[in-house]
Image: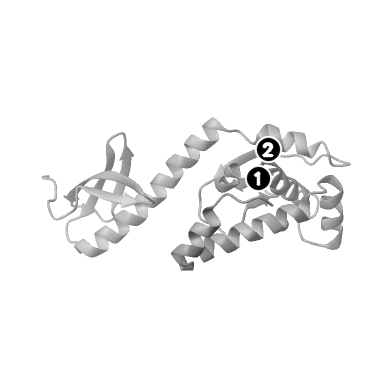
Amino acid sequence: MPLSSDFPSTITIDGTELHLRVERKAIKNVNARMGESGMQVSVPLRLDRAEALRIIDELARRLLRRQRAHQINREDDPTELARRIAQRFPKPPEVRSVEFTTVASTCWGSYSPRTQSIRLSAVLRHMPPWVLEAVVAHELAHAIYPNHSPAFWALLRSVYPDTDRARAFLSGVTWLAHAWEHLPPVERSQLAAEREE
Ligand SMILES: [Zn+2]
């Protein structure tokens, strides 16, 4: 099957340029594979071009994020950090796995009681270490309290006193992430300037 010339040869996803090879095939769904040289996609014969491009975009984003998550977890295993912080608890919670995730989410971390696993937003790796630690402590505390009850906060503040400072820091990050695009250029460069407290 010849390459479809009605598709672009590159696409840009989250600022990353990818080579794209698209083939039309007698299949039902769009299939995509991420290789060394870019993304190879098979598109059903009769699928509308615009719809195919929309699906390709979505698949590319998902595959890129997954690839990035693998890379991050190879470089940087947060399991040791979680074990170390677990030791601060009166009764250290059990965790089976701790990993960074690149999924776009409103959560900085999550704990699954079913799998006893913690997932942490990969963005946390770029923040001061105590902020990442605070999120790890928060998720570990969920291994004991599956809610945000007063008892949960009391335990968390006793094992990680910087908890409220970290929450304030993360609220600021969330605020900026949403406000950034709407800030006028002068105020943006004002923010980017080095500042003394
Ligand atoms: Zn929570």
Task: Identify which residue, 1 or 11, lies in the foreground.
Answer: 11
Tell me residue 61's x, y (percent).
Answer: 39, 51
Task: Identify which residue, 52 or 45, lies in the foreground.
Answer: 52
- Mark 1, secondary structure of its residue: strand
Neighbor class of circle 1 (other Cα within 10 Å; few <14, some 14-19, many 20+) is many
* Side (left or right) of 75 relative to 39: right
Residue at image x 84%, y 42%? Answer: 89
Which residue has dot 2 on it? 96
Quarter of the figure with residue 92 = top right
The CA distance from mark 1 to mark 2 is: 8 Å
Residue at image x 63%, y 60%? Answer: 172
Tell me residue 181's x, y (percent).
Answer: 46, 64
Quarter of the figure with residue 1 = top left
Ligand 1 positioned in quadrant: bottom right
Of pointers 1 and 2, the one earlier in the residue sequence: 2
Which residue has dot 1 on it? 118
Quarter of the figure with residue 39 = top left
Tell me residue 55's x, y (percent).
Answer: 31, 58
Inspect the image, locate mark 1, and give the three-letter code of the amino acid beneath it: Ile
